């Protein structure tokens, strides 16, 4: 079986979160979605499971993180700088925040971080490893 990752995220408004992630380029897998959760597919191996708070509580008794807290930031590679910019514009259009951290532009790598409406952080980045300076390739 192919190794995959399913990232579970508690969300306050499931329909709004589905619209948000759809606008970023995820597609919903109805086979693993219902009125309490939505499986949003980024690639064959990367999925985000959006869970209502009630559904989230069936997985763990740990408290939801307070608004503004960050426990993890997930990064998605994109095909171009333009795609990175487009993802950040889409985030804002759907109630998220763009550029929650300073934009990173190293020439060979370009990244902008965004937050979904629940404050979950995502890094959108493009990289051209062939253009990476030789000294940086050794790290």
Image (cartoon, helix red, strand yellow):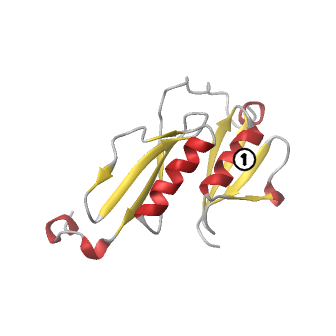
- Circle 1 packing at 10 Å, graded few (<14), some (14-19), many (20+), is many
What secondary structure is found at the residue carrying circle 1? helix
In this view, 5 is above or below 53: below
**From the image, which quarter does the N terminus lie in?**
bottom right
Q: Measured along the vertical axis of the image, is residue 92 above or below residue 42? A: above
Q: Nearer the viewer, residue 34 or 117?
A: 117
Q: Which residue is mark 1?
A: 18
Q: Is residue 37 left or right of residue 11?
A: right
Q: Residue at x 26, y 62 (%)?
A: 107
Q: Position of residue 70 (x, y in %)?
A: 47, 33
Residue 10 lies in quadrant = top right
Q: Is residue 77 visible?
A: no
What residue is rendered at 72% in x and 47% in y? 18
- Residue at (46%, 55%) from the top-left corner? 85
**Total number of numbered discs in the rendering:** 1
Give residue 32's position: percent from left, percent from top: 79, 56
| Residue farthest to the right, as pictured | 35
Identify the image quadrant of residue 99: top left
| Image x and y of residue 100, in percent | 42, 37
Q: Quadrant of residue 65?
A: top right
Q: Does 130 sit left or right of 18 as displayed?
A: left
Check the picture and name the quadrant holding the C terminus.
Answer: bottom left
Residue 27 appears left or right of 107: right
> Relative to 81, is 52 on the left or the right?
right
Q: Is residue 3 visible?
A: yes
Q: Nearer the viewer, residue 139 or 131?
A: 131
The residue sitting at the bottom extreme is: 130
- Nearer to us in this view, 15 or 58: 15
């Amino acid at each position: 079986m192919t190794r995959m990752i399913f990232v579970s995220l508690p969300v306050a408004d499931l329909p709004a979160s589905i619209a948000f992630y759809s606008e970023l380029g995820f597609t919903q897998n109805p086979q693993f979605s219902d009125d309490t959760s939505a499986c949003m597919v980024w690639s064959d191996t990367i999925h985000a499971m959006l869970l209502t708070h009630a559904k989230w509580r069936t997985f763990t008794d740990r408290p939801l993180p307070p608004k503004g807290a960050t426990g993890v930031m997930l990064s998605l590679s994109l095909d171009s700088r333009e795609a990175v910019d487009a993802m950040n514009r889409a985030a804002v259009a759907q109630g998220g925040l763009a550029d929650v951290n300073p934009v990173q532009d190293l020439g060979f790598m370009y990244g902008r971080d965004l937050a979904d409406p629940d404050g979950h952080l995502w890094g959108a980045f493009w990289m051209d490893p062939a253009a990476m300076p030789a000294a940086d390739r050794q790290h």
